[in-house]
Amino acid sequence: MKLEDIVTVRIGRNLSRGNERNDLTLVAYSYEDLMDDLDGSFLDSQTNSYSGNSNHKNSYLSSTGDVVFSFVSSKAGIVSDLSQGKIINQNFAKLVITYDQLDSSYLCYALNESSSMKKQMAISMQGSTVPKLTPAILKELKITLPSIEKQQTIGKAYFYLRKRQALAKKQAKFEEQLYLEVLRQLDQ
């Protein structure tokens, strides 16, 4: 089935046209926010898996549990508490799940890791000077869905893996800092 059959793609706001005064106080959702959310911050935000229904369906503001897709990096993530309330710009889209047999974590896994999806994206972006997925291409991507139970298992495992990888990177960075500080102390 096509992605447009199971999700509504809501493109972010063009911030260069921000005429409203309250836009000045809002912080834009960024690629770094997406990477932080993708690295398991979402797991800390949620006690239960997200149902896919956002209170801000028509809003440009991010809400905990929203599935967000970057057109520039072709990556999807789930908004965590840390990124809640940031404005989604035109380089991102909210993917509002309209099919009750689709798990949001699995959707992120499929968009980010599925070889079938990656192949479709690569073919669609051929010939572009700047390879960037468009909303029209995104909607046309075909996805095969296993049972909802299997989706939940895969999605949960995927985010736990991402979190574990992020923690391992942090640990390696802290160890490097510790060793370098010890070496500086020895060098004095």
Image: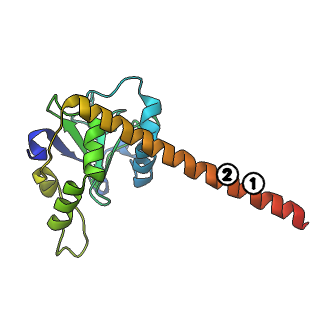
Q: Quadrant of residue 78?
A: top left
Query: Mark 1: which secondary structure?
Result: helix
Q: Position of residue 93 (x, y in %)?
A: 25, 47
Coordinates of residue 67 in the picture (x, y in percent): 29, 40
Q: Is residue 178 above or below residue 154?
A: below
Q: Nearer the viewer, residue 147 or 31?
A: 147
Residue type at mark 1 is Leu
Taking the spot 40% from the left edge, 52% from the top edge, the residue there is 30
Quadrant into which the N terminus falls: top left
Task: Determine whether 26 is above or below 72 in the image.
Answer: above
Quick check: 40 above or below 19? Answer: above
Q: Position of residue 20 (x, y in %)?
A: 31, 44
**Callout 2–callout 1 Cβ contact below 8 Å:** yes
Q: Above or below — where is 88 with respect to 134?
A: above
Check disc 2 and report its element: helix, strand or loop.
Answer: helix
- The C terminus lies in quadrant: bottom right
Tell me the residue that label 2 is attached to.
174
Query: Which residue is the site of mark 1?
Result: 178
Residue 46: in sight, yes or no?
A: yes
What residue do we see at 39% from left, 48% from top?
A: 34
Residue 83 at x, y = what percent? 43, 40
- Tell how many labels: 2
* Residue at image coords 21%, 37%: 96
Residue type at mark 2: give it.
Answer: Phe
